[in-house]
Amino acid sequence: MNTRITRTRISALALVALGVSAVACGGDDSDTLQVYSGRHYGIETAFEQFTEDTGIDVEFLTGNDAELRERIAAEGEDTQADAYITVDAGNLAAAADEDLFRSIDSPVLEEAIPESLRDPENRWFGLAVRVRTIVYNTDEIDEADLPTSYEELAEPEWEGRICMRNSTNVYQQSLVASLISEHGEDEALAIVEGWADNAEILSNDVLIIESVADGLCEIGLVNHYYLGRALEENPDLPVGLTWANQEDRGVHVNISGGGVTTYSKHPEQAQQFLEWLATDGQDVLVAENHEYPANPDVAAEELIATEFGVDFLRDELNASIFGSLNPEAVRLMDEAGYS
Amino acid sequence: MSTSALRVGGVTKRFGEVVAVDDVSFDVADTELLALVGPSGCGKSTLLRLIAGLFPSDGGVIELDGVVADDEHTSLPPEKRRVGLVFQEHALFPHLSVAKNVGFGVRASTSERNSRVSEMLDLVGMSGYTDRFPHELSGGERQRVALARALAPRPALMLLDEPFASLDPNLRVQIRDDVVDILRSTRTPAVFVTHDQNEALAVGDRVAVMNAGRVAQLDTPEQIFHRPASRFVASFMGEADFLSPADVRDGLGGHEFVATDVDPADSGDLMVRPDDIEFEPSADGGATVTGVEFRGSSRCYTLQLRSGATVRSLRSHLVDTPIDTHVRPSLVPGHRPVPIAD
Amino acid sequence: MTIPWRRTGRGGWTWSSVLAALLVAVPVVMVVGSVLRPSTDVWSQQWSTRLPGELRDTALLLVGVAIGTTVLGAGLAWLVSAYRFPGSKPFGWMLILPLAMPSYILGFLTLSTIGPTGPVQDWWREQFGRDAWFPDVDSLWGAIATFTLVLYPYVYLLSRAALRDQAGGAYQAARTLGASRSEATRRIILPLIRPAIAAGGAVVMMETLTDFATVQYFGVDTVSVGVFRVWRGTYDRNAAAEIATLVLAFALLAIGLERIARGRARFGQSGGAGAGIEPTQLRGWRAAAAVATCLAVILAAFAGPVVRLAAWAIQEQRSDRGTPQLDQYPDYLWNSVQLVIFAVLACTAVAVVLANAQRFGRPRITKLSSRITAMGYAVPGPVVGIGVILAVVALDDALGWIGLELPGAVATGSILVLVYAYFIRFLAPGLGAVESGIGQVSDEMTASARTLGSGSIDTMRRVHVPLMRSSFVVAAVLVGVDALKELPIVLLLRPFGFDTLPVWVYNLASESRYQQAALPALSIIAVALLPVMLLARQLDRPDP
């Protein structure tokens, strides 16, 4: 009996020890820079490069943007995150709204990132640019007949000819937010209602491109890098791209970007990290994913530069504006019956 | 002065709205065998489980060997009560051998436990079965092992819940007698729950008849059978007919009753059992045979008196009287009707 | 008068089960509790726009999946139990393989294979022209079919157990009473396995209800999707929590339906006492049809998808791009396995305590506690995740008040917190299995052990645990497979560097790099196969 009890005790101790070691390896107070990232692609190479350049170690945690933001908020002062990198201005604006970012005084970042791609209070900075625009089946439709603006996609002539992304998607949301900013709620609602009437709603941009390629839709609305990726795999894909709204305010651009958290334990290094990403690290960050660099002094990678070009008019609406309008955009799509 | 092995004082148990055990009191003396009998749902099994400590009571006191096991302040868990429990379904542990089952409750060194196990298996006549598993045993064998298992830790009180109900009838009496012998030889007091009145009468030093959560009568088997305290006890503990004093006097010619606390003038009813009644054919005997039930060594006749009341009469199988025969019933000499309070 | 608290030796068990219930309930309540401060404008706006449609779609999806899994699960269980045909034995266990397939993977594969842009429809259009009719795959029907194929094994498993344990005698009795085969099936077998169908159906409905990834592939707008759109799109977690209560309401409805469907029958209590059904040999076209049915299901739900994933994986490996992060595969695998083991240990251990507490503690309180712990299963993963963070941070604050402090990492990401969240989410399936295990131990056996001087803990150790052992396998498999596939919680709560196989899939799939995600997805299925095979073996083993 005694031996049995001892055995039970020992196994209980072992379990506790396992638990403790599990906790211990969970995180520490070393000098490692810790980053929460809603961006998954190409980020790892960038981190390695940064460590090589600066000698600062980086640990990162990928995840869903909104949930990582909630995690930082819930962790409060205990957060391990020094920096939060995420896609979509809406996420960045929401994090700033919840005071999760601190304001940074960085001449380097202010110099490198155009004003429209950063927070007016310097709490976050756009680092890469993703353009949401019109793609089309080059066999089905003449370039001359293409719609030239987002607004035009709401016209009855496009009924049943468009594929669009569902309203759960942040890029579609931010595009609608930019429409609200441009036209006001009522007019924006009418446009989105027009879209809802005209479009087949799909669950991701890759499907939209495939549908356009298969001729199931003549045109689609996607982020440019998805087409970049598709063309990389199959250069003969019969899908072309046209920049929207070149006659007026320019095509809608969203960003992925980041900021230094309010309760960061290593704010200087975190700032250094952002500065590096905005300058020396731009290439590594954007190239693999076919994004446009946020820093105008950095050249776009070859495939998109040749296929899509770099000279196009971008909507200069500040990302913080359409970011803050994101909730209204979601509600507006609800009202419009845009699923 | 020796204390009782068990004292139950005013014990009550409710399940929601249902009062399963209602203010029950009795004692079990050292070495006594008490049979607890009653129809299903009368609360006898619940009472047994209260004594074993499987759940706490809602009132009253249970004392085991003079120690309070259950009252308003405390409810000892079953493992602290030193009671042995044997169930109808035996409840042997299927993952343990016979020896391990029997040794389960013996807290002692391995060698002491082993000798206790073989002692117990000897006692129940199962010595050769140590390494068998429960599923390899017959019903009777399982019952013996269950008894040995319960006796092994030397319980201060044995509780048996319908222990023979699952056995074949021909096996049943023999095992029952063996169990009683073993309990007596080990001088273990026991409470024995059954719904079979013959078993209760045969086994119990005393018999407690329960009905609707209460003890209807507690007495020796003879008293229970011959002097039932109520109509319920009378009819539950054997075949009984209830007649008015007028029927007894006019129909059976009976004038003497068993002396009880009950005044027959108050109660209005007298109990007779079939073995109290005999009859002989008689054209003006005042009764008619309306039914016969052949029972092997005997026949049970149903007689209708002139008043319309019926009474049964148990006769030898040699007496063969056809239905519709006119007969004269009478009390067997020495047998007297019992006044019943209602 | 009853004195409520007296020394009865039940306190420890009762308190343990109350503690377990609190551990589950507190984080959930902390999230859902925000409903008490309603943000009416979002609520009313949602009611006037999407909610009615979401409620309708959720209801239709649940009903469709419930019917689908019942027909497929119970039907296949009947087919392999009551008939013998070529391969009926191996089909018997192969039919539980889809349990290893995460619904988000099958959903994606279904769409990419027979969806509008998939090779099947491409070929179809080539043959019959561009406007040739083809069933609408990215629809409610597609979602129902996908969930049915992935989830039917729950109903199948429980139905088979019921058929094996109880149906034989009753079925034969019915046949000797002159009932035809179909009549005996309808009047005897169906009612007998109804509790099993109900129990399986409840699991199926919970899994369907808390999903928000698969449904989105098919463009089905459920209430869960609504929760995430409001939460992630409008950043209003109060409003999201309010809508989340509707998910809980559906869950309660499902549990209620299960209780009604189960009726007064108790499931899994037969102790394997009854004889199984003597199978009838099928011949000719009937045998062929039976084989074809089993093959079709296995092909659609498991073999087909695995082959397609394998083809992609090979293609990716041959391309110069390769699968990203492949070098970290051993880490992902080890992390996943570790997490699954911890989750299984935690859930099974607590389930054993809860099941035993129902024997040894105060019955009403312990039963209620057990039912409360089942609630966690009905809460979507991310809601559990946020709730756990809030609860742990609150605990940290409370400890701060009395001058103590949790080690920094505990409050935020640690395996401990992660396992805690898994525990909340997956205790219910583990408890269900363990409860049916303790059901095999009669009250009399417990009482015998107790009166033989064994305390409650000793009785649990010496009698209950040995007799419940086979139910531990079932519990471990159900918890383990769920824990292995779980994504949102691990995304949200894991510590730095603790990436698992599903996280790997997520990192690629969230960037729509599906083909590159094929290898990681295959590896999840491969790992999930181990416990599933264990279960399959147990299924084939005759009763002791």
Image (spheres, grey):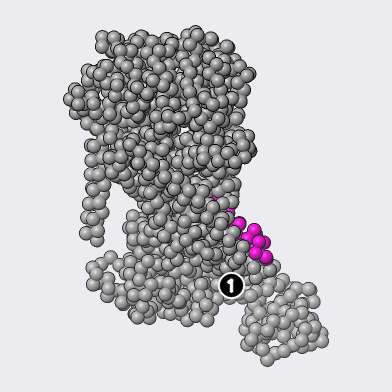
Residue marked by disc 1: B237
Q: Is residue C112 visible?
A: yes
What residue is drawn where x is 23% and y is 24%?
A: A50
Instruction: Tell me the magenta residue range.
Output: C179-202
Chain at numbered mark 1? B
> B33 or A287, which is in the foreground?
A287
Q: Position of residue C410 (x, y in %)?
A: 28, 34
Q: Height in image: C199 above or below C223?
A: below
Q: Position of residue C166 (x, y in %)?
A: 54, 63
What residue is drawn where x is 65% and y is 83%?
A: B295
The quadrant in which residue C288 appears is bottom right
Q: Position of residue C68 (x, y in %)?
A: 58, 47
Q: Is residue A220 visible?
A: no
> A34 or B262, which is in the foreground?
A34
The C terminus of chain B: image quadrant: bottom right
Q: Position of residue C259 (x, y in %)?
A: 56, 47
What residue is drawn where x is 50% and y is 52%?
A: C298
Instruction: Say left or right for C490 vs B234.
Output: left
Name the chief secondary structure element in magenta. Answer: helix
Instruction: Say left or right for A51 vs C175.
Output: left
What residue is drawn where x is 33% and y is 58%?
A: C461
Q: Height in image: A284 above or below C375?
A: above
| In magenta segment, residue C193 | yes
Amino acid type for the residue under numbered disc 1: Met
* Mark 1, other Cα within 10 Å: few <14 / some 14–19 / many ≥20: many
